[in-house]
Image (cartoon, rainbow, N blue to C red):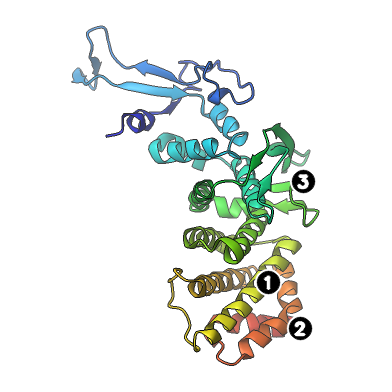
Amino acid sequence: SNAFRSDLASLDDNRWDGWNSSYSLNGNAFLDETNNAFESVDLNNNNGSTDINHGQNVKQKRLLTTNFEHLFQSFGGTLHNELGALTLYTLLQSSPIFAASLAARSDLDMLVIPLLRTIYFSSSINQHIAGRTTAASAKTTPSGEKIVNSSSSVAVSENPFRSQSQLYVIMILLLIFSQDTSFGPDSFRRSNISVVIWYKERNLKNISLGSLIVLSLLRCISFNLNRMQDPFLLSNCCAVLLNLSPHIVNIHSYAAMRLASVLVSSMKRYTVLVMKNGGRPAEEGDVSSILGMYAETCRILLQVVKHGIRRRVVEKNLHLVYALVYHQRDFSTVLKAKKSPFRPPDTEKITAMIKKADG
């Protein structure tokens, strides 16, 4: 077995146990070799055994402890690089206690925003990240509402395009976060970002974390389909979107427009590819070809849109309804195309909503 992972499996929080909670966080303290942020505690008595469980002798055990709050804050400033992302992934996979403490937090946006920023720049045409990176900071309004501001900057050296392996780790981290039952609702209802200074296509203000995740994933999907054509990256992007889709409420106007736009453009492209393939659509779940990748993209985005216009939440997603009405001509053209691969059960709820909203 891996001794390193075995030690991490015993990692515990020392904030309330009185072992050593005096570590100060100065920059990236947990990545500083001179800072002994982790403490190893021997649970032994002087005879080399631990006398617990009513006198039963227990084998010697070492317990690794650290301040989870400081660790969390440190990750907020280091997840933009591959080392920080890999370290967080390793801890989540190796330490059940740390993973549970992370799942219980209501401010996971502090970790998610640096990940989204890396995805954003990794999906740019020039594939270059320069200057400074952004870490999130939070403040509370007099009414008690929490505002996440992503304008505080952390200096980093200029770096080229993030490696493909780093994108994999980032997508897996987002997938892990999205699988938590409270993450989806909180990302759309509680976490509000006052300004996103690194998003250049649109001046984004007062956008929910969920809407920002949707925007970043749509950008990554489009870039992947047009340039990288990586099945693994596409599958993970789609999985995160699908996990978040039942919780989409009050989606930002720009995120809603981008969702409808990417859906229609993907449907157009998939229809053309099906025609070139002799009218034969891709098999469901097969993303080994560009035909299959567009088919999977259309299938997932259709499900996301249908979740967003359910009767229970449609009044809270009027921006999405407007975006669908705006693109209704292109949407109808795709459905009426010769040898269209889209069946009525896949689209009838959307077409019905468009007719109702436009009528």
Q: In which quadrant of the rendered image does the C terminus lie?
A: bottom right
- Outermost right residue: 203
Distance from disc 1 to disc 3, alpha carbons, whole Å, reads 24 Å
On screen, 104 above or below 277? above
Q: Nearer the viewer, mark 1 or mark 2?
A: 1
Query: Identity of the amino acid at label 1?
Result: Ala
On the picture, is 318 further left or further right than 235? right
Query: Identity of the amino acid at label 2?
Result: Asp
Residue 26 % position (x, y): 63, 21
Q: What residue would you read off at disc 3?
A: 197
Graded by Cα atoms within 10 Å as few (under 14), some (14 to 19) or many (20 or more), the crowding at tag 2 reads few
Graded by Cα atoms within 10 Å as few (under 14), some (14 to 19) or many (20 or more), the crowding at tag 3 reads some
Which residue sits at x=47%, y=16%? Answer: 18
Q: What residue would you read off at disc 2?
A: 358
Mark 1 or mark 3: which comes first in sequence?
A: 3
Q: Nearer the viewer, residue 314 or 125?
A: 125
Q: In which quadrant of the rendered image does the N terminus lie?
A: top left
Distance from disc 2 to disc 3, alpha carbons, whole Å, reads 35 Å
Residue 33 % position (x, y): 52, 19
Query: Identity of the amino acid at label 3?
Result: Ile
Mark 2 or mark 3: which comes first in sequence?
A: 3
Residue 160 % position (x, y): 63, 43
